[in-house]
Image: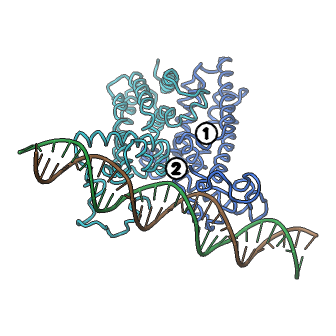
Chain colours: A blue, B cyan, C brown, D green
Amino acid sequence: MDTNRHIGEIPRWGMGMMARRTEGRPGGNTTTRISVRNRKTILDAAIKVFTEKGYDGASIAEIAAASKLPKANIYYYFGTKEAIYRTLIADVLHEWDDALAHLTAERDPAEALAGYIRAKLDFTRRHAAQSRMFANEAVHGGRFLSRTDRARMQAITHAKMRVFEAWMDAGRMDRVDPVHLFVMLWSSTQYYADFDVLARNALASSRITVDDYDRAAETITRIILKGCGLAA
Amino acid sequence: MDTNRHIGEIPRWGMGMMARRTEGRPGGNTTTRISVRNRKTILDAAIKVFTEKGYDGASIAEIAAASKLPKANIYYYFGTKEAIYRTLIADVLHEWDDALAHLTAERDPAEALAGYIRAKLDFTRRHAAQSRMFANEAVHGGRFLSRTDRARMQAITHAKMRVFEAWMDAGRMDRVDPVHLFVMLWSSTQYYADFDVLARNALASSRITVDDYDRAAETITRIILKGCGLAA
DNA sequence: CCGGAAGTTGACCAAAGCGTCAACTTTCTC
DNA sequence: GAGAAAGTTGACGCTTTGGTCAACTTCCGG
């Protein structure tokens, strides 16, 4: 209903099976100077457009305009709108791993949590567009999150929940439900990027500054740490 | 670029000025049995569609199908897609006030906060679709949030922040930044509805149950209260 | 039970959307 | 520097979409 719309069941091009488009695209797999540069240009432009308009609202024409390349050229590198989007989603998913790396069972819980909160807020501040793009995807039910993506996310989340549990077992923090603690961490650190308008409205300012992020980090850290029985 | 597309600068219908559409619509203002029923039918169907697809992704044809009314009939009651959407957004905005009513300076802070968290989670659970629709609107920068809407939200938020400050001044809770406390409350209670896919993934279940919501309420309440120096 | 208001609806329109294509130019490779 | 591979692009096809319209039926107060 989205893609392949007027192509129907039977491929019209020669060659066997599907192939073509996304994979097998003419410029889809090349790694030449030009192709690398152009793919980057396109993805950068696409982030902006997808962030502002969402998947459905974004048009290839707009991405073309933003990247200053003709529409047909976009199709030369990415066979479909979906292919561009999926690439971007996969990217952001991987980029979150860095912040998560803070949470290891060996570290001091207070230190680790504080580090995580700070790293996560830092990331969302610097990559607000991607953050929002992902938020949009999630709000729409994760239509383009593959089974693998979900499994990966789940594995990582659960690994971190086991870290919390290890801390609790060792009596190093209060016993709380790890899932919901994780949600609190995740949601409060995402908020400023994902719901920028609302945050700005609450802060009564036209832009969220680095100072705002600092204060957010401090407040969230203090409440979470104390809330989990971790002395400051 | 969205609406009024092929109408251009000059209205084509007779009558002076704009008028027509949204306001002045034929069936736009009537309060007959039939019109009330149909408007409700349409809005109910529209919530579903807008929630799933977002503003841009939703099509009137789809809303028509979902409400089992012909497309032209939708236009009889709502002049534009935007009019339907705006109505829905305005509605949800008002419905949040109820939960907020918990937060008054006179009440015991611990009790008030616990009540708020519970009420908010309850609301998002029962009106998950609207919640998500609003989240989607916010993620897209609040294109359809009028100046009045924003002002109202800001006024309410700030009023509640003053409640927090009153509690702090009276030494009834720790001194923390009220904006960011508010964000923590808001974001963690919205998460389960807005990011349903992610929450389900973390919970490793196919549906978020009432029990899940209970555990969420308990965990969030405990961490926030203790985190703000409020004895359980 | 009549006349006007309210409601219903199929057919239609123009714009915008995604994706295609074939001809052309630039860039490599040997 | 010639031939092949890679890249470029304007014009085009078909579908969907928001919105309109005019003819028709139903409803309701007097």
Q: Which residue is tagged 2?
A: A209
Query: How far is mark 2 from mark 1, CA to CA?
Result: 15 Å
State left or right for residue B177 relative to residue D27: right
Q: Earlier in the sequence, mark 2 or mark 1?
A: 1
State left or right for residue B78 relative to residue A9: left
Instruction: Say which of B202 and B126 sits in front.
Output: B126
Q: Amino acid at mark 2?
A: Thr
- Residue plotted at (65% across, 49% down): A86
Q: Amino acid at mark 1?
A: Arg
Local crowd size for mark 1, using a 10 Å CA cut-off: few (<14), some (14–19), many (≥20): many
- Residue plotted at (58% across, 22% down): A177
Q: Is residue B27 visible?
A: yes
Q: Secondary structure at mark 2?
A: loop
Q: Is residue B154 visible?
A: no
Instruction: Say which of D15 and A183 sits in front.
Output: D15
State left or right for residue B56 relative to residue B198: left
Instruction: Say which of D13 and B47 sits in front.
Output: D13
Circle 2/circle 1 CB separation < 8 Å: no
Image quarter where the C terminus of chain A lies is top right
Q: Quadrant of residue A16?
A: bottom right
Chain letter of the residue carrying label 1: A
Local crowd size for mark 2, using a 10 Å CA cut-off: few (<14), some (14–19), many (≥20): few
Q: Is residue B225 above or below residue C18?
A: above
- The percent coordinates of residue B135 (x first, y second) are 47, 42
State left or right for residue A39 relative to residue A216: right
- Residue plotted at (35% across, 36% down): B95
Instruction: Say which of B170 and A107 sits in front.
Output: A107
- The percent coordinates of residue A42 (x first, y second) are 65, 60
Chain letter of the residue carrying label 2: A
- The percent coordinates of residue B51 (x first, y second) are 46, 42
Q: Which residue is tagged 1?
A: A118
- The percent coordinates of residue D20 (x first, y second) are 33, 61
